[in-house]
Amino acid sequence: MDNFGCNPFSFVKIKIIKIKRKYKLEQWPKRFTSSQLLTILIVVVLLVLAIIIGKLEKRPPKLLLPQAQAAVIENEDPYQPWLADLLLRLKTAESSNDPLAVNHQDKKKTGESSIGCYQYQPKTFIAKVREYNLLPEVEDKELMNWIWDCRFQEELTGLILKEPEGWRHWYTSFKRLKLPVYQAKVGS
């Protein structure tokens, strides 16, 4: 009988023996050599590392700015990585990424419900779309079909966030999440 305490790979041997007994895998070798056990251990470690590295690569990028306090960004290109991260965090805070989200609680405060990924109120949505001339051929009633389009709202939100004080449309979310603030210099 083997003395498992002497072999540094005894825990692997014990596991293999239990698996063999449980699943009746008698065709497996009765005894593994140290080199076979070492090879198995290395393969398992490499597989675990590959899984961990794969998960790390799939994570969304971290905010490139300090999160401890709201930062002021001046004259940055609005399509820098910080904006993509900011839009994602803002969308998550406003609607949990749900394009069909409707906040009826806002109706008590402002008279209109907030709609979509970035929780636009209809009047604000129509006014900003017209201000940026995004859909010049579309009538106001038809614009309400676009309020449900998450990508369109994201594009509009990116433009609004470029405005001086544009972030104030989402004041509560910015303050609660301590999101960075973009302030464009007037006349730039």
Image (cartoon, rainbow, N blue to C red):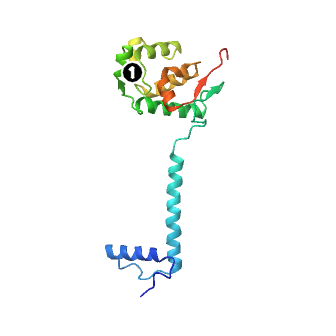
Can you tell which quarter of the image residue 166 is in? top right
Query: Where does the image place residue 109, in percent across and percent down from the top left?
Result: 38, 16
Q: Position of residue 7 (x, y in %)?
A: 50, 80
Residue 60 is left or right of residue 111, and the answer is: right
Residue lying furthest bottom in this view? Answer: 1
The amino acid at mark 1 is Ser
**Relative to residue 68, is residue 121 drawn left or right?**
left
Q: Position of residue 114 (x, y in %)?
A: 39, 21
Q: Where is residue 112 shown, x and y percent of the image?
A: 37, 16
Residue drawn at point x = 36 percent, y = 75 percent? 18
Q: Residue at 53% across / 68% down in the picture?
A: 42
Q: Which residue is drawn at the image coordinates 49% and 71% (left, top)?
A: 40
Mark count = 1
From the viewer's perspective, is residue 1 above or below residue 43?
A: below
Quarter occupied by residue 139: top left
Q: Nearer the viewer, residue 63 or 157?
A: 63
Query: SS for tag 1?
Result: strand
Q: Which residue is mark 1?
A: 114
Nearest the camera: 151 or 127?
127
46 vs 146, nearest the viewer: 46
Quadrant (top left/top right/bottom left/bottom right) for the N terminus: bottom left
